[in-house]
């Protein structure tokens, strides 16, 4: 994707979340990094927010305890943005500070162990092959609903113990939450979807209590640490964030990665010739076009000065992950995809930084590696089915996810199956 869109007023474009900005935010972020690296915005939700765009500032802010993730401390602003329905689903480690965050994360880490993740490898491979088996090679397919989304959805649902015949409904509700804007009708749809998801998870947890299995949900129910088990509210909310974040972000990552590999054929040839390079290539793809454009909200618990800008106590703060990962002060030639870029895994912040570093990062990496190696091994000639510039990106007026709306490809150009 060529970075051609520019704005005469980048702060206004970012505030309004214009379709042009959402389609390609990178030129606007580049202007903000240069002219207003800590930028006050007034987004469509109507709550003033400070946007941090430079790498060093972003990395520092992600670990700064003065920027709280406990949105109960900024409840008025939170409710103005999301309404009341989200509160019940946000009693989890993503929206908490130490010591609560430490306790919740310890419990989840104890259940989501590296051994449990690695044990999923054969099943992830089986799911990937099965999905591609069902894809036609006679006509173009949209790789998002046929492959990128069902792969991580099936994996996280199996991990949590969600029955197979209940997964599609959970996915539908999650789509509504991910793509909702800020108008009255949108908030109504958001409240309904979140309410349905919460009710479903309450019921699923009750079933797991009666009949525990070997799944992660059962492990979370029985998990104990020195500070005790999860409360019922924390358990529902933790299941929610694992289900939602555990497939949406990875699905968009897979879609973004395939798109950029297909539109950078010189780079693609390198990893096709030596698939052992895929793990390193994935780290550069995460940096170049991750699926989390901005961090979830934080708020300042005291006045905080960054560069020459005073962020007042109580103000909401967002950190532009996508911008920080393209900062030329941190990465040479950052707008160029370079799959052989050295040291990128320890530098990019696609999975965050600090105490809230993504607990699901190992699973996302595993799923990306299997998805990409399987796709290009089975269909080495896969190609875009439409001009790259015609592919649509998410333009929901809230820059949380960065991903495609569609990814039409021909698996075997000229194929007959």
Image: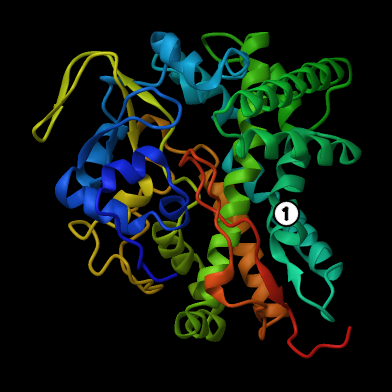
Query: Residue 255, position in %: x, y?
Result: 60, 61
Query: Residue 238, position in %: x, y?
Result: 62, 23
Give the side of residue 141 with respect to residue 94, left or right: right
Give the side of residue 233 with respect to residue 201, left or right: left
Closer to the camera, 238 or 325?
Answer: 325
Residue 367 in sight: yes
Query: Residue 28, position in %: x, y?
Result: 30, 53
Q: In the displayed structure, would residue 401 be above or below residue 4? A: above
Q: Quadrant of the N terminus?
A: bottom left
Query: Residue 337, position in %: x, y?
Result: 38, 71
Residue 66 location, quadrant = top left
Q: How many marks?
A: 1
Q: Residues within 10 Å of mark 1 (few under 14, many from 20)?
A: many
Closer to the camera, 394 or 243?
Answer: 394
Residue 30 location, quadrant = bottom left
Residue 230 in sight: no
Q: In the displayed structure, would residue 333 be above or below residue 351? A: below
The residue that appears at 42% across and 42% down in the rendered structure is 17
SS of the residue under disc 1: helix
The residue that appears at 82% across and 22% down in the rendered structure is 204
The residue that appears at 33% across and 20% down in the rendered structure is 299
Give the side of residue 54 with respect to residue 111, left or right: left
Residue lying farthest to the left in this orientation: 308
Closer to the camera, 224 or 395?
Answer: 395
| Residue designated by label 1 | 151
Residue lying farthest to the bottom in this orientation: 414
Q: Quadrant of the C terminus?
A: bottom right
The residue that appears at 50% across and 83% down in the rendered structure is 265
């Amino acid at each position: 994707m060529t970075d051609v869109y520019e704005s005469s007023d980048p702060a206004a474009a970012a505030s309004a979340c214009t379709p042009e900005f959402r389609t390609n935010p990178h030129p606007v972020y580049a202007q903000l990094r240069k002219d207003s690296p800590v930028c006050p915005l007034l987004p469509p939700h109507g709550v003033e927010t400070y946007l941090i765009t430079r790498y060093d500032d972003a990395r520092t802010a992600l670990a700064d305890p003065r920027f709280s993730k406990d949105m109960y401390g900024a409840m008025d602003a939170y409710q103005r943005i999301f309404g009341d329905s989200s509160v019940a689903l946000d009693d989890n480690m993503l929206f908490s500070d130490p010591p609560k965050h430490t306790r919740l994360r310890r419990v989840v880490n104890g259940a989501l162990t590296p051994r449990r993740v690695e044990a999923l490898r054969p099943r992830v491979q089986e799911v990937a092959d099965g999905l591609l088996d069902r894809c036609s090679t006679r006509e173009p397919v949209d790789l998002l609903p046929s492959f990128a989304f069902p792969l991580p959805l099936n994996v996280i649902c199996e991990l949590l113990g969600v029955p197979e015949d209940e997964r599609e409904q959970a996915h539908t509700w999650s789509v509504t939450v991910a793509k909702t804007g800020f108008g009255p009708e949108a908030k109504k749809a958001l409240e309904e979807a979140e309410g349905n998801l919460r009710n479903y998870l309450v019921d699923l947890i009750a079933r797991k209590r009666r009949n525990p299995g070997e799944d992660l949900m059962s492990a979370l129910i029985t998990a104990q640490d020195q500070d005790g088990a999860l409360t019922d509210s924390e358990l529902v909310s933790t299941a929610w964030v694992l289900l939602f974040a555990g497939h949406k972000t990875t699905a968009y990552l897979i879609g973004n990665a395939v798109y950029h590999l297909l539109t950078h054929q010189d780079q693609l040839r390198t990893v096709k010739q030596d698939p052992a390079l895929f793990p390193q290539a994935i780290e550069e793809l995460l940096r170049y076009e991750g699926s989390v454009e901005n961090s979830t909200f934080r708020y300042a618990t005291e006045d905080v000065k960054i560069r020459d800008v005073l962020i007042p106590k109580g103000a909401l703060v967002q950190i532009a992950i996508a911008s920080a990962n393209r900062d030329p002060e941190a990465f040479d030639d950052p707008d160029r995809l370079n799959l052989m870029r050295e040291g990128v895994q320890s530098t990019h912040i696609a999975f965050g930084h600090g105490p809230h570093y993504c607990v699901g990062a190992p699973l996302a990496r595993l799923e990306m590696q299997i998805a990409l190696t399987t796709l290009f091994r089975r269909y080495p000639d896969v190609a875009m089915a439409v001009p790259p510039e015609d592919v649509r990106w998410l333009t929901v007026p809230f820059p949380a996810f960065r991903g495609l709306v569609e990814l039409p490809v021909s698996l075997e150009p000229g194929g007959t199956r």
